[in-house]
Image: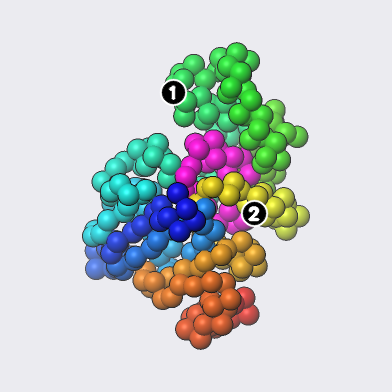
Amino acid sequence: MTDDTVVLQTHGLVKRFGGITATDHVNLSITQGARHALIGPNGAGKTTLINLITGVLPQSEGRIILEGADITDLAPHQRVRRGLVRTFQINQLFSGMTPLETLTMVVSQHRGLGAKWWQALGQNTSVVERCGQLLEQFRLTDVMHQRTEQMPYGKRRLLEMAIALACEPRVLLLDEPVAGVPAGEREELLHTVSALPAEVSVVLIEHDMDLVFEFAKRITVLVNGAVLTEGTPAEIAQDPQVKAVYLGHGEGAHV
């Protein structure tokens, strides 16, 4: 694949809740190795769109194409198996497990070891090596034996990203990775986001405009469930429609 290869597309994606259209005929194209941000005011439909793409919600209309294959009707776990992986706005972790135990379970499951994941803690060299790489990459070695519920919130967000990467994604969807993270813990997380593997196409949903403009090479703006505009960070920063939308929501200073 080249950098221009489209790995994920939505065609006319619609989601209706009764008489409310939360996602309004969205066409989105994500290229190989993309650093693509999805922004918009509260209620713009960003998380609903990600829920549709990942199969958490069924679409009312439209299609989703992953690497040339129609995945519109696949279950969420089947999409993960094909390389479409996400993190959540609110972390979804096993509070009583350590990062080492959690990653061992995820890596083992992904490699088809199933219920034997606990054996890999000391017996499966490839699983042990992969977990070690992930713990180091996501700066978790200092808390690898600590119960997740006792870890700082920033470390929990890092663990969630490590879990996502353990699933060997080709497209990774990050839903507000720094939401709720205290200022003192953000730098570590921001550095890790920027250092994600180049071959993984990343879609970032984020309200922190500093992170968006530092990270993204392309930005899509959603308003009222529909695409308002799309472009480079420089184009978006100067777009009068975008400025009007954010000024209208008291966020003009961030654009």
Residue 227 lies in quadrant: bottom left
**Label pair 2/1, CB-CB below 8 angstroms:** no
Look at 58% across and 49% down and name the residue there. Answer: 198
Other-residue count near label 1 (Cα within 10 Å), few / some / many at <14 / 14–19 / ≥20: few
- Using residue 142 as the reference point, say whether residue 229 is left or right of it: left
| Three-letter amino acid code of the residue under disc 2 | Ser
- Using residue 218 as the reference point, say whether residue 83 is left or right of it: left
Look at 35% across and 38% down and name the residue there. Answer: 78
Residue 94 lies in quadrant: top right
Task: Estimate the x, y position of residue 147 in percent, counting from the top left.
Answer: 65, 31
Q: Secondary structure at mark 2?
A: helix
Residue 150 lies in quadrant: top right
Which segment did they paint magenta?
158-180
- Which residue is labeled 1 in the image? 112
Q: Is residue 49 covered in magenta?
A: no
Task: Estimate the x, y position of residue 24 in percent, counting from the top left.
Answer: 31, 68
| Three-letter amino acid code of the residue under disc 1 | Gly
Look at 46% across and 20% down and name the residue there. Answer: 113
- Using residue 89 as the reference point, say whether residue 49 is left or right of it: left
Task: Estimate the x, y position of residue 23 in percent, counting from the top left.
Answer: 33, 65
Q: Is residue 28 visible?
A: yes
Q: Residue furthest front?
A: 2
Look at 61% across and 68% down and name the residue there. Answer: 213
Task: Estimate the x, y position of residue 137 in percent, counting from the top left.
Answer: 67, 40
- Which residue is labeled 2 in the image? 194
Residue situated in front as seen by the camera: 13 or 99: 13
Residue situated in front as seen by the camera: 111 or 22: 111
